[in-house]
Amino acid sequence: MSSPPLPHLALIGAGITSLTLSIRLSALAIPHTIYEQSASLTELGAGLGFGPNAVRALEYIDPRLVEIFNKTATFVGTPSHQGKELLVQEGKGVDERVWIEFLDGTKQGRGETLEPEFVITAGNGRGHAAVHRGQWLDVLGGLADKERIMFGKRVVDVVCLDGKMRIVFADGTDAGADGVVGCDGVKSKVREVLMGMLGDGRERGKCGYSGKYAYRCLVPWGKAVEAVGDDRAGVSSLWMGLNRHLLTFPVHRQSEQFLNLVAFVTDEDGQMWPQEGPASLTLPATKADALRDFEQAGFSGSVRRLLEMTKERMDKWGLYDVADRPLSKFYFGRIMVIGDAAHASTPHHGSGAGFCMEDIAVLGALFEESIAHQSLTVETLEDVFAAFDCQRRERDQWLVKSSRRAADLYQWRIPDFLEPNSFEKMKADIEQRQEHCWGFDVEAAVREAKKHMSERLTLHTQS
């Protein structure tokens, strides 16, 4: 007796999460089509951070991704000269890999030593690297089956009609599928539809403004070294201050090296982006805007010099997330969301991409176990989606909340960390939270997912 045909999935969006998931589904021979609103593969932003948890997840998704990652990523470096001195004081080796060195951005003057207040070292195994978003998307596009991608398909609705999922597009066409997986990012339309199905109203499915925005750009390496020196440019650095912080880390694009610069600002009036939802995640800005924002907050020499090395015109990004509007479930029936569509987060733990890769590793394990039981059918898709929700929602939503808190910590907005000499307390708090991100046991999660799926399928068969 032959097995029933595997269900056909519609993946909405063709970003990093969707293409990575497509690679995994293809390996399992699960039929699927990707629907993307743009005319081609595009990825906004510059640097994309991967931690050890992300790399462990990639090993389960496709070992080729790890091999390419190791060849193309810019890994965290050894500490600066001043960072080494701090590590020695803590009884650590000077060859430790450094995640970020944290500096007081208000006391670094021209010609002064750029001395960090504390250093967070990189733990929990391989990883701790940055890749250029566009370059990584090219990698995924080269491994994924591009014949599966339908471009120019902006989703306006998803409905269940006569037992079939129908995806409705802005061009007046529609398409059918057995199941729908929303991989459409921060401004996910599928999340809005899902929120409506869950009874919370589609409007609550929109992402919300976090109250912060960021200037983002790539500084040519020579200019970065001129601004802060080769020693400081070569290590990830975070300059702290009241209602502001600035992050820099090296990143390669093809054969060129840059310093990725992201300057974060708390929008104290909360009026920089419309509260009803973003028409765009970006607004035009200038170097003068960024300099004014940081000079007003008392940032000094090194930060100003870095900002002076940026282009005259740059983008200003509104930081949106779902912290105020979390989903009660990541699925309803045969529609689900994954990655940023499920748990859009601000970037302050540097772990958003890693959690997306964890999602895919777990979802792939659930599909794999269902196929092993010869039980992946249209009828059991909801079991797969329910198991994913059970395995991932709590951890994913922790990241959203904790990332907001991390930014407030860096920007001296949490009263418990404002007393004199509070940097040691701050360091301990950051280390504990980063351990929660990096130390995730992907192997155990995959094992648990398969066990959970097997139990669900047994119950499904008995019922």
Image (spheres, rainbow, N blue to C red):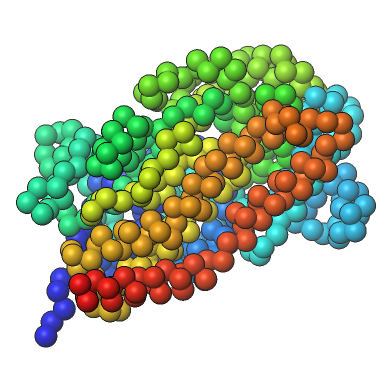
Q: Residue at x 35, y 70 (%)?
A: 453
Above/below status of 338 relative to 415: below
* Front residue of this view, candidates 142 and 189: 189
The quarter holding residue 227 reads top right
Left or right of residue 79, residue 291 in this image: left
Q: Residue at x 30, y 79 (%)?
A: 372
Residue 383 position within the rendered picture, expressed as x and y whole percent measured from the top left:
28, 63
Quarter of the picture holding the C terminus: bottom left
Q: Residue furthest front?
A: 463
The quarter holding residue 248 reads top right
* Front residue of this view, candidates 448 and 148: 448
Left or right of residue 313, residue 222 in this image: right
Above/below status of 118 relative to 59: above
Q: How many marks?
A: 0
Q: Residue at x 55, y 40 (%)?
A: 401
Q: Residue at x 62, y 37 (%)?
A: 405
Residue 19 position within the rendered picture, expressed as x and y whole percent measured from the top left:
36, 54
